[in-house]
Image: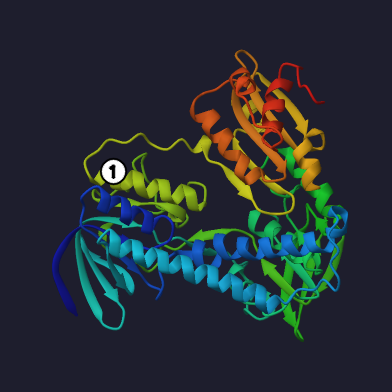
Amino acid sequence: MSSESTIYDVAVIGSGPGGYVAAIKGSQLGLKVALIEKYAKLGGTCLHWGCIPTKSILFCAELYHRAQNAKEFGILCKDVRFDYRLVKARKDRMVKKLAMGIDFLMKKYRVTAVAGKATITAPGVLAVEGEAVTEVKARNLVIATGSEAMVFPGIDADGQVILTNKEILDLDSVPKSLLVIGAGAVGIEFASLFARFGCEVTVVEMLPRILPLEDQDISAELHRLLSKRKIRIMTGTRLESLANRDGSAVATVATAGGEIQTLTAEKALLAVGRRPVTAGIGLEALGISTTRGFIPVNGHMESNVPGVFAIGDVVSSPQLAHVASHEGMLAMRRIAGQNPEPLDYDRVPNCTFCAPEVASVGLTEEKARAQGHDVVTSRFPFAAIGKASILGENDGFVKLVCDRKYNQILGLHMIGPHVTELVAEGTAALGLEATAEDLSHLIHAHPTVSEAVMEAAEAIYGAAIHY
């Protein structure tokens, strides 16, 4: 084993949006940082098999949908077709470009990138197995190894017919039919994407509704709109078995009414959640505790072992790229001797890039009531917004959840055009502890879809103008 004489201030294991952002922040704070990545490329799941590639393909699906309906806008398109191989090629170019950007940032901020699989062998010591085995020493350690797709026991995700989020991104063509197991953000995004390319999609969800973490009204509206697009949605339905039979995905499910059905599709996608990647990295060498694979941490991302931090999908916070990034920056500030405020996980924005888009921040109506708030809500439809009509996207609404006493904003929930961008306004409003009155008095440009947020704030007082 070769050994580097350098002792780093921090070694970060994993280069996803938690790890590489943490490494940059550490360097900005004057720390000497090593970033260790087991794959040959930096960026983690988010860049290579998650956020970026899926949104690239979703955008292509949106353009195809627009071209098919261009006559409504006075644009005449003949022989509208798509070539999925070119869609995939563009996705690959986007990923490569952004990966090169991360490489550049590592050089810019003088972060030492080390390729190989890291294993903790002793306090402050990592064995990194790449082309050779290298020993990396550091005074502090940030574990950012991320997560991987969960697979039900007894189901063989063969990567050919039964797929995870990785393999489905490498398809060279759109399957004629797709069975999606799981109706969280990942499952719904892929269902929406492939349906727009003409695939026959069936979604199976064990829970009573799709996007179960979202507000009930949002989930119900999305269910209605996806069903109108001929996506078959089976909620309250339990998967009994799934197998590759003669090149087709064959599933047995038990419906909410107790009926046993057999479903067959060309491909199946397992989107039933993700589990932390913490096994086999040497946590036991330091006595780092885990709970169901997750590493318990305090508000500064510190584990039970001094000098060892954990961020992102290996802790039990929301499994979102932007959460991991902020946790990484928080951990580095702590290592640098600062005393940063812990993150407020009730103010984390959620986005689902389906069609129509879904976005939210803060408490749902159900959670607000459960926490003892005297809740008042409002809804404002995009159908009453001029810009939404111009876009030809009238579906959906903005829902505001407030505490009745002062009308302080507790949550903002949206389904409709560009809401994954609009949610930033809700994040700011919650962060500034704004009331519905504060929000309603802010001048929103006309014509924009953001006016729906202002109108929803007015609607708390029964004073919406355009509805």
Identify the residue shown where x is 86% and y is 56%: 74
- Could you say which is closer to the camera, residue 281 or residue 292? 281
Residue 424: quadrant of the picture: top right
The answer to whether one can see residue 248 in this image is yes
User: In the image, 378: left or right of 292?
Assistant: right
- Could you say which is closer to the camera, residue 121 or residue 341? 341
Of the residues shown, which amino acid type is indicated by label 1?
Arg
> Looking at the picture, how far across and down is residue 236, in whole percent?
78, 52
- Picture quarter with the C terminus: top right
Q: Is residue 398 above or below residue 285?
A: above
User: In the image, 229: left or right of 216?
Assistant: right
Label 1: how many residues lie within 10 Å, few (<14), some (14-19) or many (20+)?
some
Identify the residue shown where x is 75% and y is 17%: 463
Furthest toward the bottom, the residue is 246
The answer to whether one can see residue 212 in this image is no
Q: Which residue is mark 1?
A: 333
- Quick one: SS at disc 1? helix
Residue 439: quadrant of the picture: top right
- Could you say which is closer to the camera, residue 279 or residue 300? 300
